[in-house]
Protein backbone atom coordinates (compact mmCIF):
# COMPACT_ATOMS: atom_id res chain seq x y z
CA UNK A 1 0.00 0.00 0.00
CA UNK A 2 1.30 3.48 -0.81
CA UNK A 3 -1.20 5.40 1.40
CA UNK A 4 -1.22 8.31 -1.07
CA UNK A 5 -4.76 9.40 -0.24
CA UNK A 6 -4.34 9.39 3.56
CA UNK A 7 -0.69 10.20 4.36
CA UNK A 8 0.65 13.58 5.56
CA UNK A 9 2.65 15.76 3.21
CA UNK A 10 6.38 15.14 2.84
CA UNK A 11 9.21 17.67 3.03
CA UNK A 12 9.56 17.88 -0.75
CA UNK A 13 5.88 18.89 -1.07
CA UNK A 14 6.00 21.76 1.43
CA UNK A 15 6.80 24.65 -0.94
CA UNK A 16 3.99 23.77 -3.36
CA UNK A 17 1.40 23.18 -0.60
CA UNK A 18 2.32 26.42 1.19
CA UNK A 19 1.74 28.39 -2.03
CA UNK A 20 -1.58 26.58 -2.43
CA UNK A 21 -2.54 27.46 1.16
CA UNK A 22 -1.83 31.14 0.61
CA UNK A 23 -4.36 31.24 -2.24
CA UNK A 24 -7.22 30.41 0.17
CA UNK A 25 -9.01 33.60 1.16
CA UNK A 26 -10.48 32.02 4.29
CA UNK A 27 -7.03 30.98 5.49
CA UNK A 28 -5.75 34.52 4.97
CA UNK A 29 -8.69 35.92 6.98
CA UNK A 30 -8.02 33.55 9.88
CA UNK A 31 -4.31 34.42 9.99
CA UNK A 32 -5.16 38.14 10.01
CA UNK A 33 -7.54 37.47 12.91
CA UNK A 34 -4.81 35.59 14.83
CA UNK A 35 -2.17 38.24 14.05
CA UNK A 36 -4.03 41.56 13.68
CA UNK A 37 -0.82 43.44 14.49
CA UNK A 38 1.19 41.72 11.73
CA UNK A 39 0.98 42.85 8.09
CA UNK A 40 -0.06 39.79 6.09
CA UNK A 41 2.74 40.19 3.58
CA UNK A 42 5.25 39.59 6.42
CA UNK A 43 3.46 36.39 7.44
CA UNK A 44 3.28 35.38 3.78
CA UNK A 45 7.04 35.88 3.38
CA UNK A 46 7.65 33.80 6.49
CA UNK A 47 5.41 31.00 5.23
CA UNK A 48 7.07 31.00 1.80
CA UNK A 49 10.48 30.55 3.46
CA UNK A 50 9.42 27.24 5.03
CA UNK A 51 11.33 24.31 3.50
CA UNK A 52 10.21 21.24 5.48
CA UNK A 53 7.58 19.88 7.87
CA UNK A 54 9.71 20.29 11.00
CA UNK A 55 10.31 23.95 10.17
CA UNK A 56 6.58 24.44 9.50
CA UNK A 57 5.72 23.07 12.94
CA UNK A 58 8.41 25.03 14.79
CA UNK A 59 8.06 28.37 13.00
CA UNK A 60 4.34 28.46 12.14
CA UNK A 61 2.41 26.10 14.44
CA UNK A 62 4.33 26.73 17.69
CA UNK A 63 3.94 30.56 17.59
CA UNK A 64 0.21 30.15 16.88
CA UNK A 65 -0.12 27.80 19.86
CA UNK A 66 1.92 30.18 22.02
CA UNK A 67 -0.51 32.96 21.25
CA UNK A 68 -3.57 30.73 21.66
CA UNK A 69 -2.38 29.53 25.09
CA UNK A 70 -1.67 33.10 26.19
CA UNK A 71 -5.08 34.40 25.05
CA UNK A 72 -7.41 31.55 26.03
CA UNK A 73 -5.80 29.56 28.85
CA UNK A 74 -4.20 29.88 32.26
CA UNK A 75 -1.21 27.90 31.06
CA UNK A 76 -0.17 24.44 29.90
CA UNK A 77 1.54 21.87 32.10
CA UNK A 78 2.52 18.24 31.59
CA UNK A 79 3.38 15.13 33.59
CA UNK A 80 4.89 11.71 32.86
CA UNK A 81 7.21 12.71 30.00
CA UNK A 82 9.86 10.53 31.70
CA UNK A 83 7.74 7.51 30.74
CA UNK A 84 8.77 7.76 27.08
CA UNK A 85 12.18 7.56 25.38
CA UNK A 86 13.62 9.78 22.68
CA UNK A 87 14.19 7.96 19.39
CA UNK A 88 11.45 5.40 20.09
CA UNK A 89 8.08 5.33 18.28
CA UNK A 90 4.82 5.11 20.23
CA UNK A 91 1.14 4.73 19.49
CA UNK A 92 -0.33 7.43 21.72
CA UNK A 93 -3.95 6.53 22.54
CA UNK A 94 -5.54 9.68 23.92
CA UNK A 95 -8.59 11.19 25.53
CA UNK A 96 -10.46 13.31 23.02
CA UNK A 97 -12.20 16.48 24.20
CA UNK A 98 -11.08 19.05 21.66
CA UNK A 99 -11.02 18.51 17.89
CA UNK A 100 -7.71 20.29 17.29
CA UNK A 101 -5.96 20.91 20.59
CA UNK A 102 -5.63 17.46 22.21
CA UNK A 103 -3.07 16.29 19.66
CA UNK A 104 -1.63 19.76 18.97
CA UNK A 105 -0.78 20.37 22.62
CA UNK A 106 0.79 16.94 23.04
CA UNK A 107 2.99 17.62 20.00
CA UNK A 108 3.77 21.12 21.34
CA UNK A 109 5.11 19.54 24.55
CA UNK A 110 7.07 16.90 22.63
CA UNK A 111 8.72 19.64 20.55
CA UNK A 112 9.57 21.75 23.61
CA UNK A 113 11.12 18.71 25.31
CA UNK A 114 13.23 17.70 22.31
CA UNK A 115 11.16 14.73 21.10
CA UNK A 116 10.09 14.04 17.52
CA UNK A 117 6.43 15.01 17.04
CA UNK A 118 3.78 12.37 16.35
CA UNK A 119 1.65 12.02 13.25
CA UNK A 120 -2.01 12.79 14.00
CA UNK A 121 -5.05 10.73 13.03
CA UNK A 122 -7.90 13.00 11.91
CA UNK A 123 -11.35 12.01 10.63
CA UNK A 124 -12.32 12.81 7.05
CA UNK A 125 -15.54 14.37 8.38
CA UNK A 126 -13.36 17.41 9.16
CA UNK A 127 -11.77 17.46 5.73
CA UNK A 128 -14.52 19.16 3.72
CA UNK A 129 -12.51 22.33 3.01
CA UNK A 130 -9.46 21.95 0.71
CA UNK A 131 -7.24 24.49 2.51
CA UNK A 132 -7.94 22.75 5.85
CA UNK A 133 -6.69 19.49 4.29
CA UNK A 134 -3.49 21.25 3.20
CA UNK A 135 -3.00 22.81 6.63
CA UNK A 136 -3.43 19.61 8.65
CA UNK A 137 -1.33 17.52 6.26
CA UNK A 138 1.47 20.08 6.56
CA UNK A 139 1.12 19.57 10.33
CA UNK A 140 1.73 15.78 10.10
CA UNK A 141 -1.92 14.67 10.06
CA UNK A 142 -3.16 11.61 8.20
CA UNK A 143 -6.74 10.88 7.23
CA UNK A 144 -9.05 8.34 8.88
CA UNK A 145 -11.79 7.42 6.41
CA UNK A 146 -15.10 7.48 8.27
CA UNK A 147 -17.43 8.68 5.56
CA UNK A 148 -17.32 5.50 3.45
CA UNK A 149 -19.97 3.05 2.31
CA UNK A 150 -20.62 0.06 4.55
CA UNK A 151 -18.98 -2.37 2.13
CA UNK A 152 -15.78 -0.25 2.14
CA UNK A 153 -15.42 0.05 5.91
CA UNK A 154 -13.37 -3.14 6.31
CA UNK A 155 -10.99 -2.09 3.52
CA UNK A 156 -10.60 1.36 5.10
CA UNK A 157 -9.84 -0.22 8.51
CA UNK A 158 -7.21 -2.51 6.98
CA UNK A 159 -5.58 0.43 5.19
CA UNK A 160 -5.54 2.45 8.42
CA UNK A 161 -4.07 -0.47 10.38
CA UNK A 162 -1.41 -0.95 7.71
CA UNK A 163 -0.54 2.72 7.84
CA UNK A 164 -0.23 2.76 11.65
CA UNK A 165 1.85 -0.44 11.75
CA UNK A 166 4.09 0.73 8.88
CA UNK A 167 4.65 4.19 10.38
CA UNK A 168 5.56 2.90 13.86
CA UNK A 169 7.50 -0.24 13.00
CA UNK A 170 9.10 0.57 9.64
CA UNK A 171 9.56 4.34 9.83
CA UNK A 172 9.99 4.58 13.63
CA UNK A 173 7.54 7.50 13.82
CA UNK A 174 4.98 7.97 16.60
CA UNK A 175 1.24 8.32 16.05
CA UNK A 176 -1.50 10.07 18.05
CA UNK A 177 -5.04 8.66 17.83
CA UNK A 178 -8.20 9.29 19.86
CA UNK A 179 -9.35 6.44 22.09
CA UNK A 180 -12.67 6.36 20.25
CA UNK A 181 -14.34 7.80 17.20
CA UNK A 182 -15.58 11.26 18.14
CA UNK A 183 -15.03 13.24 21.32
CA UNK A 184 -15.91 12.20 24.88
CA UNK A 185 -18.48 14.97 25.08
CA UNK A 186 -19.90 13.69 28.38
CA UNK A 187 -16.48 13.62 30.04
CA UNK A 188 -16.57 9.81 30.35
CA UNK A 189 -13.33 8.72 28.68
CA UNK A 190 -13.65 5.15 27.35
CA UNK A 191 -11.56 3.34 24.74
CA UNK A 192 -13.53 1.63 21.98
CA UNK A 193 -12.63 -2.05 21.62
CA UNK A 194 -12.97 -1.78 17.82
CA UNK A 195 -9.94 0.53 17.86
CA UNK A 196 -7.79 -2.24 19.36
CA UNK A 197 -9.13 -4.71 16.79
CA UNK A 198 -8.16 -2.28 14.03
CA UNK A 199 -4.60 -1.96 15.36
CA UNK A 200 -4.23 -5.76 15.10
CA UNK A 201 -5.55 -6.13 11.54
CA UNK A 202 -2.21 -5.49 9.84
CA UNK A 203 -0.05 -7.30 12.38
CA UNK A 204 2.41 -9.83 10.98
CA UNK A 205 1.88 -12.38 13.75
CA UNK A 206 -1.03 -14.77 14.22
CA UNK A 207 -0.81 -13.89 17.93
CA UNK A 208 -2.71 -10.65 18.51
CA UNK A 209 -0.75 -9.77 21.67
CA UNK A 210 2.54 -9.89 19.75
CA UNK A 211 1.15 -7.46 17.17
CA UNK A 212 -0.12 -5.06 19.81
CA UNK A 213 3.07 -5.21 21.89
CA UNK A 214 5.03 -4.13 18.80
CA UNK A 215 3.08 -0.85 18.64
CA UNK A 216 4.26 0.52 22.02
CA UNK A 217 0.80 1.74 23.04
CA UNK A 218 1.05 4.68 25.45
CA UNK A 219 -2.11 6.19 27.05
CA UNK A 220 -2.47 9.99 27.13
CA UNK A 221 -4.90 12.07 29.23
CA UNK A 222 -5.52 15.73 28.34
CA UNK A 223 -7.34 17.72 31.05
CA UNK A 224 -8.98 21.12 30.57
CA UNK A 225 -10.21 23.19 33.50
CA UNK A 226 -13.03 24.50 31.32
CA UNK A 227 -14.37 22.92 28.14
CA UNK A 228 -15.08 25.73 25.63
CA UNK A 229 -17.60 23.46 23.85
CA UNK A 230 -19.43 22.33 27.00
CA UNK A 231 -22.80 23.91 26.26
CA UNK A 232 -22.52 23.24 22.52
CA UNK A 233 -22.59 19.50 23.25
CA UNK A 234 -25.54 19.53 25.68
CA UNK A 235 -28.35 19.18 23.06
CA UNK A 236 -26.63 16.08 21.64
CA UNK A 237 -26.05 14.56 25.08
CA UNK A 238 -29.70 15.09 26.10
CA UNK A 239 -30.97 13.54 22.86
CA UNK A 240 -28.79 10.48 23.37
CA UNK A 241 -29.86 10.20 27.02
CA UNK A 242 -33.46 10.01 25.80
CA UNK A 243 -32.54 7.38 23.22
CA UNK A 244 -33.19 9.75 20.33
CA UNK A 245 -31.03 10.19 17.25
CA UNK A 246 -29.02 13.39 17.02
CA UNK A 247 -28.41 14.98 13.62
CA UNK A 248 -25.47 17.35 13.35
CA UNK A 249 -26.14 20.78 11.89
CA UNK A 250 -24.21 21.78 8.75
CA UNK A 251 -20.65 22.83 9.63
CA UNK A 252 -21.24 21.92 13.31
CA UNK A 253 -17.80 20.32 13.61
CA UNK A 254 -16.17 23.46 12.23
CA UNK A 255 -18.08 25.57 14.78
CA UNK A 256 -16.85 23.32 17.60
CA UNK A 257 -13.33 23.45 16.19
CA UNK A 258 -13.32 27.25 16.22
CA UNK A 259 -14.87 27.48 19.70
CA UNK A 260 -12.38 24.96 21.07
CA UNK A 261 -9.50 27.05 19.77
CA UNK A 262 -10.80 30.47 20.80
CA UNK A 263 -12.80 29.68 23.96
CA UNK A 264 -11.72 29.92 27.60
CA UNK A 265 -9.94 26.77 28.76
CA UNK A 266 -8.40 27.69 32.11
CA UNK A 267 -5.52 25.41 33.06
CA UNK A 268 -4.52 22.54 30.76
CA UNK A 269 -2.52 19.45 31.75
CA UNK A 270 -1.25 16.74 29.40
CA UNK A 271 -0.42 13.48 31.24
CA UNK A 272 1.77 10.86 29.53
CA UNK A 273 1.04 7.36 30.82
CA UNK A 274 3.40 4.39 30.86
CA UNK A 275 3.58 2.27 27.67
CA UNK A 276 1.55 -0.88 28.28
CA UNK A 277 3.68 -3.38 26.30
CA UNK A 278 5.11 -5.02 29.44
CA UNK A 279 1.64 -5.32 31.00
CA UNK A 280 0.36 -7.22 27.97
CA UNK A 281 2.35 -10.27 29.07
CA UNK A 282 -0.21 -10.85 31.83
CA UNK A 283 -2.97 -11.16 29.21
CA UNK A 284 -1.40 -14.23 27.61
CA UNK A 285 -3.49 -16.47 29.90
CA UNK A 286 -6.68 -15.22 28.21
CA UNK A 287 -8.16 -17.61 25.67
CA UNK A 288 -10.10 -15.50 23.17
CA UNK A 289 -9.20 -12.41 21.17
CA UNK A 290 -12.28 -10.68 22.56
CA UNK A 291 -10.99 -11.16 26.12
CA UNK A 292 -7.54 -9.93 25.06
CA UNK A 293 -8.92 -6.82 23.35
CA UNK A 294 -11.10 -6.07 26.38
CA UNK A 295 -8.06 -6.53 28.61
CA UNK A 296 -6.10 -3.99 26.57
CA UNK A 297 -9.01 -1.54 26.75
CA UNK A 298 -9.00 -1.91 30.55
CA UNK A 299 -5.24 -1.26 30.75
CA UNK A 300 -5.54 1.91 28.65
CA UNK A 301 -8.60 3.21 30.49
CA UNK A 302 -7.16 2.53 33.94
CA UNK A 303 -4.15 4.70 33.13
CA UNK A 304 -6.22 7.42 31.50
CA UNK A 305 -8.61 7.59 34.46
CA UNK A 306 -5.85 7.57 37.07
CA UNK A 307 -3.58 10.00 35.19
CA UNK A 308 -6.36 12.43 34.30
CA UNK A 309 -5.45 15.62 36.17
CA UNK A 310 -8.55 16.59 38.13
CA UNK A 311 -9.18 20.32 38.44
CA UNK A 312 -11.23 22.20 41.07
CA UNK A 313 -14.00 22.45 38.43
CA UNK A 314 -14.28 18.64 38.38
CA UNK A 315 -14.54 18.36 42.16
CA UNK A 316 -16.97 21.29 42.45
CA UNK A 317 -19.23 19.82 39.76
CA UNK A 318 -19.20 16.43 41.54
CA UNK A 319 -20.21 18.02 44.86
CA UNK A 320 -22.92 20.20 43.27
CA UNK A 321 -24.29 17.22 41.33
CA UNK A 322 -24.57 15.11 44.47
CA UNK A 323 -25.54 17.88 46.88
CA UNK A 324 -22.50 17.17 49.07
CA UNK A 325 -19.23 18.76 50.15
CA UNK A 326 -17.21 15.54 49.87
CA UNK A 327 -14.35 17.21 48.01
CA UNK A 328 -14.44 20.66 49.65
CA UNK A 329 -10.74 20.28 50.53
CA UNK A 330 -9.96 20.26 46.79
CA UNK A 331 -11.22 23.80 46.11
CA UNK A 332 -11.82 27.14 47.78
CA UNK A 333 -15.14 28.91 48.27
CA UNK A 334 -13.97 31.53 45.78
CA UNK A 335 -13.32 28.82 43.17
CA UNK A 336 -16.74 27.33 43.84
CA UNK A 337 -18.47 30.69 43.39
CA UNK A 338 -16.51 31.33 40.20
CA UNK A 339 -17.58 27.97 38.76
CA UNK A 340 -21.23 28.57 39.70
CA UNK A 341 -21.15 31.98 37.99
CA UNK A 342 -19.56 30.41 34.92
CA UNK A 343 -22.21 27.66 34.86
CA UNK A 344 -25.12 30.11 35.28
CA UNK A 345 -23.85 32.29 32.43
CA UNK A 346 -23.26 29.29 30.15
CA UNK A 347 -26.60 27.61 30.79
CA UNK A 348 -28.50 30.77 29.83
CA UNK A 349 -27.42 30.01 26.27
CA UNK A 350 -29.24 26.64 26.16
CA UNK A 351 -33.01 26.30 25.74
CA UNK A 352 -35.05 23.53 27.37
CA UNK A 353 -35.55 21.82 30.74
CA UNK A 354 -33.22 23.83 33.01
CA UNK A 355 -32.83 21.04 35.59
CA UNK A 356 -31.90 18.48 32.94
CA UNK A 357 -29.54 20.91 31.25
CA UNK A 358 -27.76 21.67 34.53
CA UNK A 359 -27.56 17.96 35.43
CA UNK A 360 -26.02 17.19 32.02
CA UNK A 361 -23.56 20.07 32.37
CA UNK A 362 -22.42 19.03 35.87
CA UNK A 363 -22.15 15.36 34.89
CA UNK A 364 -19.80 16.34 32.07
CA UNK A 365 -17.35 17.86 34.56
CA UNK A 366 -17.96 15.27 37.32
CA UNK A 367 -17.47 12.06 35.28
CA UNK A 368 -13.64 12.16 35.45
CA UNK A 369 -13.90 12.17 39.27
CA UNK A 370 -16.16 9.10 39.24
CA UNK A 371 -13.79 7.33 36.85
CA UNK A 372 -10.82 8.02 39.11
CA UNK A 373 -12.72 6.95 42.22
CA UNK A 374 -13.72 3.65 40.59
CA UNK A 375 -10.10 2.41 40.82
CA UNK A 376 -8.97 4.34 43.89
Image (tube, rainbow, N blue to C red):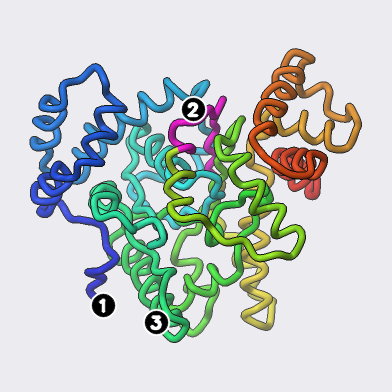
Query: Could you give the CA–CA distance between mark 1 and mark 2, rounded to whole angstroms?
Result: 39 Å
Q: Residue furthest right?
A: 324
Query: Could you give the CA–CA distance between mark 2 and mark 3, rounded to whole angstroms?
Result: 39 Å
| Residue 321 seen by the camera | yes
Residue at which label 2 appears: 76
**81 on left or right of 53:** right
- The residue drawn where x is 55% and y is 41% is 222
- The residue drawn where x is 48% and y is 37% is 259
Mark 1 element type: loop
Mark 3 element type: helix
Q: Indicate whether 93 appears above or below 208.
A: above
Residue 1: mark: 1
- The residue drawn where x is 33% and y is 58% is 128
* Residue 133, percent from left and from top: 27, 54
Q: Residues within 10 Å of mark 3 (few under 14, many from 20)?
A: few
Residue at which label 3 appears: 155
- Give the mark toward the camera: 1 or 3: 3
* Residue 327, percent from left and from top: 83, 28
| Range drawn in magenta | 259-272
Q: Residues within 10 Å of mark 1 (few under 14, many from 20)?
A: few
Mark 2 element type: strand
Counting residues from the start of the chain, the first of labels 2 and 3 encountered is 2
Counting residues from the start of the chain, the first of labels 1 and 2 encountered is 1
| Residue 312 seen by the camera | no
Q: Residue furthest top?
A: 334
Q: Are marks 1 and 2 in contact (CB under 8 Å)?
A: no
Q: Indicate whether 127 appears above or below 37.
A: below
Residue 88: mark: none
Q: Indicate whether 306 appears above or below 201.
A: above
Amino acid sequence: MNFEDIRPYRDEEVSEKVRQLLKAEQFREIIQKIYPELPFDKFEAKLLSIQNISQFQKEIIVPILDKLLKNSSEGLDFRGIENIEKGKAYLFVSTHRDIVLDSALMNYILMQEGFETAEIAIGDNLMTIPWVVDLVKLNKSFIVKRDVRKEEKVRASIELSNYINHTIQKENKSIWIAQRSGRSKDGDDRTNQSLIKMFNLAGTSEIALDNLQALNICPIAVSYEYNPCDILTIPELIKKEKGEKYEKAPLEDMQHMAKGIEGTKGRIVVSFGKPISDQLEALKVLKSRKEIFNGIVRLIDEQIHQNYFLMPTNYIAHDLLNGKSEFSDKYSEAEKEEFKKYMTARLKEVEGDSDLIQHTFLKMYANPVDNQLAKA
